[in-house]
Image (cartoon, grey):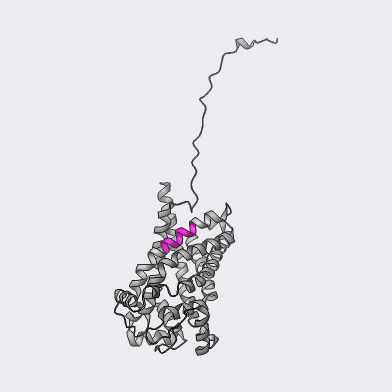
Amino acid sequence: MATDFKKSDLLPVPQPPEFHPEIVVTPAHDGLHFWQFMVAGSIAGSIEHMAMFPVDTIKTRMQVLGSCPMKSVSVRQAFGSILRIEGISGFYRGIGAMGLGAGPAHAVYFSAYEICKQSFSVGNPNNAVAHAAAGVCATVASDAVLTPMDMVKQRLQLSNSPYKGVMDCVKRAMKEEGFRAFYASYRTTVLMNAPFTAVHFSTYEAAKKGLNEISPENASDEKLIVHATAGAVAGALAAAVTTPLDVVKTQLQCQGVCGCDRFISGSISDVIRTIVKKDGYRGLIRGWMPRMLFHAPAAAICWSTYEAGKTFFQELNDD
């Protein structure tokens, strides 16, 4: 028998209170504070340059023309000559200048890169053009910080360098050549590092993405290897492409010291003509081997350290 129910006969069923779950949005791996990018970059850059400094000394000696004793284009001969004449300490002359410059310069470098990358990518993390453009902006800013100490470092690296140390070099260069001596190579450095950084960052991001796609299930476990490998590939390729401008930069920073040539105009074309006249076109690639030997492991060290620093700060922010 059917029973008719009226709406008024139904007892109201108590409803649970409205539940609005709190949505916690975890920031992306790159979503750090500005100062955290600076600290991670500063540590990474300092470790990179300190670890690879002996190779950088060999490169500087091989690139210098003029009457400086080091004329050989062989890495083995350059290494043997420094070790025999000056001992182990010869490989580390000028490391104090790099220690003073590398930290602040890389703090600016990586923080500028991250900010520009986020701005240029417009929500597309795989935008290679944005990575390259961000790298160029980063290097222009960081070179303004590093160039003076890089000049001091290279002058101290020369064989029979007339300077007693960092402060002696700074004082004498300021007194004898003026403030402009510290930025004589800035234009060349930017013109070198702009394509270097564009190739470096775009290659690094592409290599990192490709390596992660090979074994995505192990990406989190192997991220240190991925960062190091991608950094090494990017560093070696960028170093090979920009070696001629690095030779020009070395000439401008060391001009007039230890018998090295002095350039009246200081223009890139003037330096290139002098190099080609004295040493042929091979003079423009002097030091390419130690330069690649420097930048491949240096980039691997730098990127893996930088990414580890970012991971540390990300976990700290999450906690």
The percent coordinates of residue 121 (x first, y second) are 57, 55
Residue span colored magenta: 106-114
- Residue nearer the viewer, 60 or 5: 60
Image vertical order of residue 59 relative to residue 17, above or below: below
Image vertical order of residue 244 relative to residue 145, above or below: below
Q: Decide whether residue 111 is among the magenta residues.
A: yes
Q: Is residue 220 visible?
A: no
- Residue nearer the viewer, 174 or 3: 174
The percent coordinates of residue 10 (x first, y second) are 60, 13
Main SS of the magenta segment? helix
Image vertical order of residue 4 relative to residue 201, above or below: above
Q: Residue at x 43, y 61 (%)?
A: 108
Residue reaching furthest to the right: 1
Q: Residue at x 37, y 79 (%)?
A: 155
User: In the image, is 147 to the left or to the right of 241?
Assistant: left
The percent coordinates of residue 282 (x first, y second) are 53, 86
Q: Quadrant of residue 251?
A: bottom left
Quadrant location, the N terminus: top right
- Residue nearer the viewer, 102 or 174: 174
The percent coordinates of residue 309 (x first, y second) are 42, 58
Q: Is residue 152 visible?
A: yes
Q: Decide whether residue 109 is among the magenta residues.
A: yes
User: In the image, is 116 to the left or to the right of 86?
Assistant: right
- Residue nearer the viewer, 142 or 256: 256
Q: How many marks?
A: 0
